[in-house]
Amino acid sequence: MASTTAVVFVLPPSPSDTNPPLGPAILAREARKWNGAVVVRDLNIDYIRQFEDRDSVTEKNSAALGDQGKDRKLAATAASALYRQFALDPAGAMFVPDVATAEAGMHFSGPAINHAIEQHVSRGSDLAAWISHHLDECQAELGTPGVVGVSLMGPSQVFASLLLLRLAKSRWRHSVTAAGGSHVTLLTGTAEGAAMIRQFADVTLPGHSEHEFTHLLTGRRSPSSDEFDYEPHFEPGQLARYRQSTLVLPVQFSRGCLYGKCTFCTYPVVEPVATRIDAARATAALRHLSERHGVSRFSLKDSLVPAKDLLALAQAVHADGLEVVWSATTLPRRTLATMAAELAGGGLRTLEFGVESIHPANQQLMRKRSSPDEVEWMVEHLARAGIVSVVNLMFGFPGETQEQAAEQLAWAASLKQRHPGAVDFSLNMLEVVRGSPMERDTGRFGILGVAPWAYAYEWTPPPWRPEFAPSLLRLERR
């Protein structure tokens, strides 16, 4: 009889960084309903924690709750060390980004990646030995799993994930290997991408695939429903691997993006159907998770929570008497200023929103507008209520000058200086990515192509970006 135990691995460097990943916990919850067991092995946190005791690579965390509260320097140091272990031949890079590494974006040809993986396997590299050690642990604790899965949320995870799938298949020939996650969803948008993944995985699971995964593991499929389960399942042993003083549990109470117009974004492809939050169900889920795990900090992974839904959730949490704090992402709107005190009273402590650019030409290109005055008004009122604002900004648009970029950065620095400890930033250079409307505007962006496993295209950005990029990092870490 086939095993009804699955092991889902999260390979470094993962976008979840120093907190538990959500996707595998959703799979675990659904499988348990049908007597399937999903064991989540977050090798990302195991890898990162090797660097924690080195004073030179740690720094004080942001006051923000959730993703932006991570130790950015620690995560970056761990990622850089891992990229060096890939030992990919530079000649195999299809292009080298202007402000990143080819390894981080996996901008290599398929043959170059395949060759490097085979070299790791045949030579028994340190990276292959490290992954094999974790496979040995699984065998000793669980026996041979029925399904071995990897969660691929971005291109940086590709190499280590493919190496694990290759090693797992050579060890467990009769186990089904599977690949899922948002990056898999984007890659399987073409027949070529799906075939490429199937060189390493028996099954691809794009989109929200908890029902398909459960059917793969147990042979049973739960009935379809417009509602999805709000409570991810975490095992105590899994959560013990994280630093308890900063542990934040991820949750998701809606899917898709109710705005869905941003031309740089992939959410309409990754999560094409948008839903709203059921505040009562969400509050019950927060209570159950808090009581089960003794955790009071949560991060909503919903792509966008409208102001109305934020308020409804805060009111429900307050009415329930639930003592938890949480973070969320929304659109910058002046109405949030009038809600700030009530949002804080219901546990909201960090609110992330994408301004992206303060310049009208860039806003028109993105189809996303907000004025600096509106953002400043909102940040001020949120700060008074004890809510940290995380402002997302992008730089290096087509036609943008270095002077315009410097003006935007100075605006961000001024905002941070006026509200010390109450404003944080996520500052990035623009990328043209798979699944976004921008990828179809080849002329405007000078798009030249994309590597088979990559997320971002090779395009023709403004030439000043490499010189300017370090100033973004300095402000983030200030």
Image: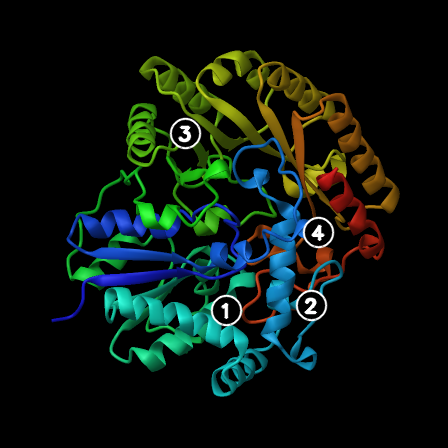
Instruction: Give the x, y percent position of residue 298.
Output: 43, 33
Q: From mark 4 to mark 3, how far is it between C-alphas?
A: 30 Å
Q: Amino acid at mark 2?
A: Leu
In the rendered image, which residue does mark 3 sit on? Answer: 296
Q: From mark 4 to mark 2, how far is it between C-alphas?
A: 39 Å
* Residue 217 found in image quarter: bottom left
N-term-proximal mark, 3 vs 2? 3
* Residue 116 found in image quarter: bottom right
84 sits to left or right of 460: left
Question: Could you say which is closer to the camera, residue 374 or residue 46?
Answer: 46
In the rendered image, which residue does mark 4 sit on? Answer: 56
Other-residue count near label 3 (Cα within 10 Å), few / some / many at <14 / 14–19 / ≥20: some
Question: Could you say which is closer to the camera, residue 405 or residue 359?
Answer: 405
N-term-proximal mark, 4 vs 2? 4
Assign a secondary structure to mark 3. Answer: loop
Q: Is residue 161 above or below residue 293?
A: below
Instruction: Give the x, y percent position of residue 96.
Output: 71, 68
* Residue 110 found in image quarter: bottom right
Q: Is residue 288 above or below residue 236?
A: above
N-term-proximal mark, 1 vs 3? 1
Task: Name the disc covering residue 160, or none.
Answer: 1
Of the two numbered discs 4 and 2 in the rendering, the one whose residue sits closer to the viewer = 4
In the rendered image, which residue does mark 2 sit on? Answer: 448
N-term-proximal mark, 2 vs 1? 1
Q: Which residue is drawn at the image coordinates 67% and 51% (left, top)?
A: 57
Assign a secondary structure to mark 2. Answer: loop
